[in-house]
Image: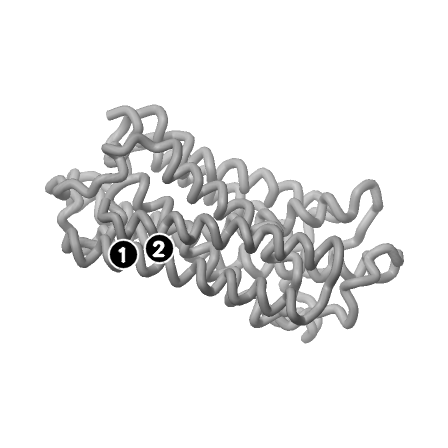
Amino acid sequence: MSSLENNLINTSFALLLLGLISYWWNLTINTNNNIISLCNILTILTNFTIALSLIIRWIENKYFPLSNLYESLIFLSWSITFLQIFIERKTKNKFIGPITVPVVLFIIGFATMSLPNELKLASPLVPALKSNWLMMHVTVMILSYATLITGSLLSFLLLIISNKKTIQIEGNSNSNSKKILFQYQMENTNEINNNLNRLKLIQLIDNLSYRIIGFGFPLLTIGIISGAVWANDAWGTYWSWDPKETWALITWIIFAIYLHSRINNKLEGKKPAIIASLGFIIIWICYLGVNFLGKGLHSYGWLIT
């Protein structure tokens, strides 16, 4: 890893710390336009520094930096911050940053402080990875993880805010015109102690979570299909029940159940949010947990090889 790349990652970590403090200050202590602008600027700078580090790694090593665990973690961090910027611009929702920034901070911290140095170094691609499918498949999978993680975090936030209250969720696909993607907003999100306003806030978060997961699910589907095609090209079989493939399928099933329950309005109240929150855990098992097994065909960049 070059010193410039390392400095950029360290800078992004420092920016995330400042962003975490700013977002939570804005959420819990004092809300004003200056703090909101500071939060937005810090997120954009973080996204830019991470992107620049990936570009430098790409130029130096002459392949898209997604060949090992470290590189994919950095790209996941970029994806989540990019999605955060997009959603905040569309919705003006002040709850996105406070829940995504800690996750990105953890990812960057884990990648830089916990992974062994040899895993951070770029190495020549093994034959199976010398393919255009590397960028296609892995990029789409990481983007789907970033999107589904964000949507799941919002569902978890819904469960926290609703506490022990009985709620009736309205955000299914047959909802009225106000529930178009990213256009369902509250007039005032500051008075969350008011029961009526809290219900509006819950509906807002639920709808946003549903729409984000609805966007991430097709990405996951495309990623799995492209992975199967690549596997057939590289290993001569579309599906081998490798641990990574199995948990990707489990992840797909969990979010398929969530979306099916929402589209058909089969589950009421907090149940869909519970399924989505479970999906958050399943994503991390699929993406990171099976990496520690060191088994299967997806063994590139494992901690145990």
Q: Quadrant of residue 136?
A: bottom left
The image quadrant where one finds the C terminus is top left
Judge from the rendering whether residue 70 lies leftward or rightward of residue 152; answer left or right.
Answer: left
- Give how far across and how far down residue 298 sits, in percent: 27, 35
Residue 127 visible: yes
The disc placed on residue 136 is 1
Give the residue at x 54% y 41%.
Answer: 280
Hey, what amino acid is under mark 2?
Val
Q: How many marks?
A: 2
Residues 150 and 9: in front is 9
In this view, 74 is above or below 294: below
Residue ID for mark 2 = 140
- Give how far across and how far down residue 184 sits, in percent: 68, 69
In this view, 270 is above or below 286: below
Q: Label 2 near label 1: C-beta < 8 Å?
A: yes
In this view, 86 is above or below 140: below
The disc placed on residue 46 is none
Give the residue at x 55% y 46%.
Answer: 102
Residues 116 and 131: in front is 116
**Secondary structure found at label 2:** helix
Separation of marks 1 and 2 at Cα, in angstroms: 6 Å
Residues 298 and 77: in front is 77
- Give how far across and how far down residue 96 sits, in percent: 60, 57
**Secondary structure found at label 1:** helix
Hey, what amino acid is under mark 1?
Met
The image quadrant where one finds the N terminus is top left
Judge from the rendering whether residue 104 lies leftward or rightward of residue 9; answer left or right.
Answer: right
Give the residue at x 37% y 59%.
Answer: 49
- Give how far across and how far down residue 151 sits, in percent: 57, 53
